[in-house]
Image (cartoon, rainbow, N blue to C red):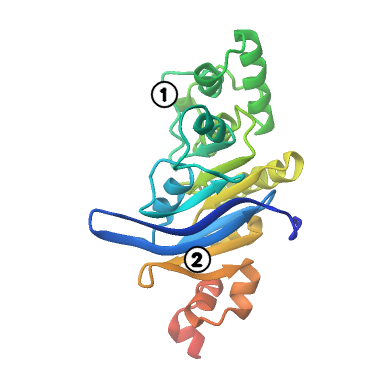
Amino acid sequence: MPRDPSAEPIIRVEHLVAGYGDRTIFDDVSFEVRRGEVFVILGGSGSGKSTLLKNMIGLYRPWQGRVLIDGADIAAAEGDERRAILRRIGVMYQQGALFGSMTLLENVRLPMEELTELPAEAMDRIAASKLKLVQLEGFEDFLPAELSGGMRKRAAIARAMALDPAILFLDEPSAGLDPITSAELDDTILRLAGTLGITFVVVTHELASIYKIADRVVMLDMETKGIVATGSPEELRDRCEIEWVRRFFRRETGAEAAA
């Protein structure tokens, strides 16, 4: 599904430096995410994908640089300004992070209970509507343990949408799912991006999902501590100047590429 390549940036990552202790994970990383696109962060183990995501959602404060959400610095903001920024984003963590003792409706209601003063009936209606958006209508009273892995991931997306965010961050949404369930989740992402205009930032290494959902990709590299490639999956597969990036997107070993 094509998105507008001329759309204005909704996220700007500017000269970001981050790490742990005395170890730099990435250095001088800059890119933009356009409003309404599905943007994928890709890289091998240790390349900094999760660290970058946590900086983008304000869990970590960068050593240097900044992340701007609609022009506001998420790490520097405090008080009401920070709360306003956080209401513009939703996050789905890798394992879903649903509360096992709460029903799906109660899980989706939780952000509204914490951050709004809506009456209970309104919260119930909104939570039910979010579950319907991810095709979980009729499962409002189920506990997470009573659902399949794919259904739990979709319920986590519904909770991430509870406050009508402009941006959804998804951390390894296909992890632990079989190919058919993963494809169904991809369809959910594309439908929400297309019908609601939500901007998605997705951390994943699943090539099938990347080809299906991604408008653009940034690829992180542990050795260079930065971005080695940016573009659509097809551009990186066919025209990237770096051979191993082309091989990655073609699923080729060095021997296969040389044959």
In the displayed structure, 193 sits above or below 114; it is below
In the displayed structure, 115 sits above or below 86; it is above
Q: Which residue is mark 1?
A: 100
- Callouts 2 and 1 close, C-beta under 8 Å: no
- Identified at 61% across, 27% down, the residue is 163
Residue toward you, 164 or 153 = 164
Quadrant for residue 122, please give it. Answer: top right
Which label is found at residue 136?
none
What secondary structure is marked by label 1?
loop
| Residue 44 visible in the snapshot | no
- Which quadrant of the rendered structure holds the N terminus? bottom right
Task: Count numbered badges in the picture.
Answer: 2
Q: Which residue is mark 2?
A: 219
Mark 2 or 1: the one toward you: 2
What secondary structure is marked by label 2?
strand
Disc 1 residue type (three-letter): Gly
User: Residue 237, image x and y in percent?
Assistant: 60, 74
User: Residue 216, image x and y in percent?
Assistant: 62, 61
- Identified at 50% across, 33% down, the residue is 82
Quadrant for residue 211, please give it. Answer: bottom right
- Identified at 41% across, 23% down, the residue is 100
Q: Residue furthest bottom?
A: 259
User: Residue 151, image x and y in percent?
Assistant: 55, 34
| Residue 187 visible in the snapshot | yes
